[in-house]
Image: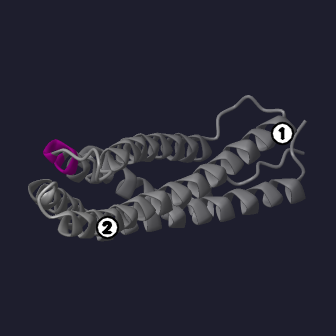
Amino acid sequence: MQLQPHRYEHYKTLLRDLLQSVTTLIRNYVNTLKSQTPNLITQANRLWELRQRQRLVMGVETTAANNLLTASNAVYQQIYQAIESLLEALDEIAKHIEDFERISNELREEAQQNCELPTLSHCTGWLLQTLSVLQTQAKYLELHTRSLHPAAIESTTAKQLQKDLQLVKEYELNICMGIAKAERQQLDILPPLAITI
């Protein structure tokens, strides 16, 4: 059984809108991460410096040590909140991708076709791969952010956070190319409906 034209257009519009929405969310996420990276690196280094100063005066000057600990906690909270904000944005991206995949599957079921829709399959694959890359990076950021806690920070932790903030160039290029292709393919997310007589 072939899909009715109005249902086909319904799916085409839904998928196009979802693709546009998730592409915008991914672009915003990557741009936010890039724009926050220098500040987060500076804050992580500042946190390490404050912790070292606190260790030097601990036991000798209690007031100074407490002031340095308070400053360290304030810096840590800023880093933690920035990473939490990225994680929330990533959750929203994941929900949109889940919706995109669900609607794609509904289209295939309703059309009762096992045939592939290449553009749709390509977009779904790219979205899932991008989500996987960003979620993996986010897990490392979350892990290393917790290690930045003023009571536990080590010099390698700040350096590791800096490393984790950078997407591997191959993945970054794949994401950028995927965004460009998705924007170009939004109008042709599904091929023209073949009408059989």
Q: Is residue 137 left or right of residue 99?
A: left
Q: What residue type is labelled 1?
A: Ala
Q: Is residue 8 left or right of residue 158?
A: right
Q: Name the residue under label 2.
A: 70
Q: Which amino acid does label 2 sit on?
A: Thr
Residue positioned 69% across, 31% down in the render:
115
Residue positioned 40% across, 59% down in the render:
80
Contact between marks 1 and 2 (CB within 8 A): the answer is no
Query: In which quarter of the view is residue 48 placed?
Result: bottom left
Q: Can residue 42 be seen in this view?
A: yes
Query: In which quarter of the view is residue 157 placed?
Result: top left
Please tell me which residue lies in front, 71 or 177. 71
Tell me the chief SS of the magenta region.
helix
Q: Name the residue under label 1.
A: 111
**Residue 59 painted magenta:** no
For numbered disc 2, what is the local secondary structure? helix
Mark nearer the viewer, 1 or 2? 2
Q: Is residue 180 visible?
A: no
Residue positioned 90% across, 51% down in the render:
4
Q: Which mark is residue 7?
A: none
User: What residue range appears in magenta?
Assistant: 155-159
Place of residue 148 in the rendered image (x, y in percent of width and height, measured from the top left): 29, 50
Please tell me which residue lies in front, 174 or 40. 40
Nearest to N terminus: mark 1 or mark 2: 2
Please tell me which residue lies in front, 165 or 31. 165
Q: In this view, does 71 lie above or below 196?
A: below
For numbered disc 1, what is the local secondary structure? helix
Residue at the top extreme, as displayed: 114
Quarter in which the N terminus is drawn: top right
Place of residue 128 in the rendered image (x, y in percent of width and height, measured from the top left): 53, 41
